[in-house]
Image (tube, rainbow, N blue to C red):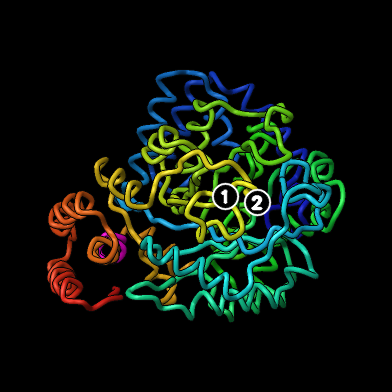
Amino acid sequence: MYDPRSLKAEEFIDHQEISDTLAYADEHKADKGLIEAILAKAEERKGLSHREASVLLACEDKDIIERLYALAEQIKKDFYGNRIVLFAPLYLSNYCINHCTYCPYHAKNKHIPRKKLTQEEVRSEVIALQDMGHKRLAIEAGEDPINNPIEYILECIDTIYSIKHKNGAIRRVNVNIAATTVENYRRLKEAGIGTYILFQETYHKESYELLHPKGPKHDYAYHTEAMDRAMEGGIDDVGLGVLFGLERYRYEFAGLLMHAEHLEAVHGVGPHTISVPRIKHADDIDPSAFDNSIDDEIFARLIALIRIAVPYTGMIISTRESEKVRERALHLGISQISGASRTSVGGYGEEERPTDTEQFDVSDQRTLDEVIKWLMDMGFLPSFCTACYRAGRTGDRFMELCKAKQIQNCCHPNALMTLKEYLTDYASPATRRVGEELIRRELLNIPKEAVRQVCAARLKKIEEGERDFRF
């Protein structure tokens, strides 16, 4: 029986509730009165239930869809402004004992080279990322208790935070590793991680078990309940996501929103981020083998409706997607993107992009400098800010700030200062020219004069060599 407050996976992600929701959406997808009522609620910027959002997803009226896109873009601006946060993934190890049918790291893949970074190799990768200008990483590793125990992950985090190269520093390490115990989550929290990220892959239990035939990840309940254990362990910023293409997208959409509702009901705060990966080609994996793939138009609608349904959450799109797809997604609610990503173990230390240990094909292969200039040319403000996490503004404290629309007095000036650091230390001349003009314009958009004056003074100090200011 469906119960968003339950701590049992099959009760807060209830199959019958999702089936009933999809049937209700089909029945009411042309009900103009209901749709207008849902849209009116959405315009209040307080979110939608999984059932309300599913009705909008099923709606086929082109005018309604265009209104959804416009509303999603405006909601993103209202809560996050024009900021886009940048990060990079760092793959530590591709050793894995799971048998996931959609991932090239699966244990049966005998021709992919297996690799695990030493601490010296971690150091080399981090310096390469710092030399690009990155300040925020998401570390990734396969599930293997022998090769990738929690002690190895913790050692890598410690190494990453310890490296200061020229003006470079990684100020936030997010962690995307397999579901684990409350005690291990507590250890990750003590290590100073930012967000704990875990993709559900699919919320459809039967499909989940077929897609994960062997290995610890086969346990649907243990995996689905991971965020509750993470929060019990003190991690209050968690990131959700499904791998679109494994199961029917409408089912996944409803399940994803139910998971967000569950976190809000039990812990008082929803997901810090929601990611929207689509299955892509990779070594030993052909995406055409999965018959639930979605086209770009459906993908755009999903992004817009997640933004509308969960207005306060950060939304992430990776370099799995092309420049064209990412550009459209930025106008529909995305607030974080990766830049210059390499999805292979040890990939940043290589001059040529290695492909033999990639987890998936990277569609957007531009440099970080090219991505930043592209963002600024479209009117977005690239941000390397990590201030909220380091100031303890996480979980419900961050959400209070976001809901009160105080981002412009906090995150906006922080974004300007971290962009100034990037322009001073790493940018090409063309990017620097565009960026300096953007900073001059955006400084005027800080509402409080006192904050604006402090920010302007700090921007000058960055020019003179000082670093790491934050509000």
Q: Which residues are magenta?
A: 406-414
* Camera-nearest residue between 41 and 367: 367
178 and 121: which one is in front? 121
At mark 2, the secondary structure is loop
> Which residue is located at x 16 percent, y 76 percent?
464
Give the residue type that dot 2 points to. Answer: Thr
Query: Quadrant of the image for the C terminus?
Result: bottom left
x, y percentage for residue 414?
A: 29, 66
Question: Label 1: which residue?
Answer: 354
**Residue marked by disc 2:** 357
Residue 115 in the magenta stretch? The answer is no
67 vs 196, left or right, is: left
Residue 169 position (above or below residue 203)? below
Instruction: Evaluate whether residue 406 shows in this view.
Output: no
Between residue 239 and residue 99, name the one nearer to us. Answer: 99
Mark 1: secondary structure: loop
Residue 396 locus on image (x, y percent): 48, 67
Relative to 471, is 452 on the left or the right? left
The amino acid type of the residue labelled 1 equals Pro
Q: Is residue 409 magenta?
A: yes
The reply to whether residue 353 is visible in this rendering is: yes
Residue 337: horizontal and vertical position, in percent? Answer: 44, 50
